[in-house]
Image (tube, grey):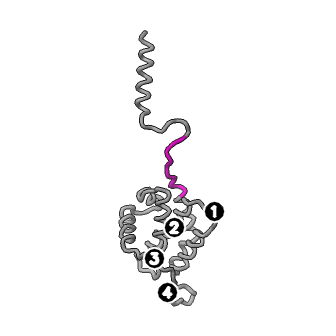
């Protein structure tokens, strides 16, 4: 008679241990796959980041061209736009011409996608190496000072002998 009682007790312990977990019917809470965002950011870095060292607007145009590709998943577009902002932010720290305008262009783009995909700042930040607390603080500061409708323009700029704009 002790075995049925032990079996019932074991089932009770098992049920208590799994309480609050998603049912095993194959439907689970959707987790964010940061690897997709990271892959898109890395692809953007590979294709576009070399341009920013000589011409911030060429970097912006490269990232914008990637974003304009048809039939790209929102999570991929998030990685591209987020890298566009992070790359421009890095150049802004060293005073590159056009970096602030470029950062201001990509900030609302990735924030809209981030909101649509319901990805929090901490999770998104882990998709690109760096200090997340500083980056997130800078993002919030930039958002607070962002103009309502950032203009996309190429201000007059001079080219050096190699044709690079600084």
- Residue 81 disc label: 2
| Helix, strand or loop under label 3 | loop
Q: Main secondary structure of the magenta part?
A: loop
Is residue 31 inside the magenta stretch? yes
Q: Residues within 10 Å of mark 1 (few under 14, many from 20)?
A: few
Quarter of the image for the N terminus: give it: top left
* Distance CA(mark 2)–CA(mark 1): 15 Å
- Residue wearing tag 3: 149
| Helix, strand or loop under label 4 | loop
Seen at 50% across and 36% down, the residue is: 23
Q: Residues within 10 Å of mark 3 (few under 14, many from 20)?
A: few
| Helix, strand or loop under label 1 | loop
Cβ atoms under marks 2 and 4 closer than 8 Å: no
* Distance CA(mark 3)–CA(mark 1): 26 Å
103 left or right, relative to 47? left
- Whole-percent x, y for residue 158 in the image: 51, 90
**What's drawn in magenta, residue-wise?**
27-36
- Whole-percent x, y for residue 117 in the image: 50, 57
């Amino acid at each position: 008679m002790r075995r049925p009682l032990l079996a019932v007790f074991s089932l009770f312990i098992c049920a208590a241990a799994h309480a609050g977990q998603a049912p095993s019917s194959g439907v689970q809470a959707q987790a964010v796959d940061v690897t997709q965002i990271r892959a898109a950011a890395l692809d953007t870095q590979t294709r576009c980041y070399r341009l920013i060292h000589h011409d911030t607007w060429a970097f912006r145009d490269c990232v914008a061209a990637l974003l304009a590709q048809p039939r790209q998943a929102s999570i991929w577009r998030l990685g591209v736009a987020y890298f566009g902002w992070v790359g421009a932010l890095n150049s802004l720290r060293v005073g590159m011409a056009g970096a602030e305008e470029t950062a201001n262009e990509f900030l609302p783009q990735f924030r809209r996608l981030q909101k649509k995909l319901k990805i929090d700042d901490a999770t998104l930040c882990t998709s690109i190496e760096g200090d997340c607390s500083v980056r997130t603080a800078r993002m919030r500061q930039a958002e607070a000072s962002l103009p309502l409708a950032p203009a996309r323009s190429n201000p007059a700029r001079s080219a050096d002998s190699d044709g690079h704009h600084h």
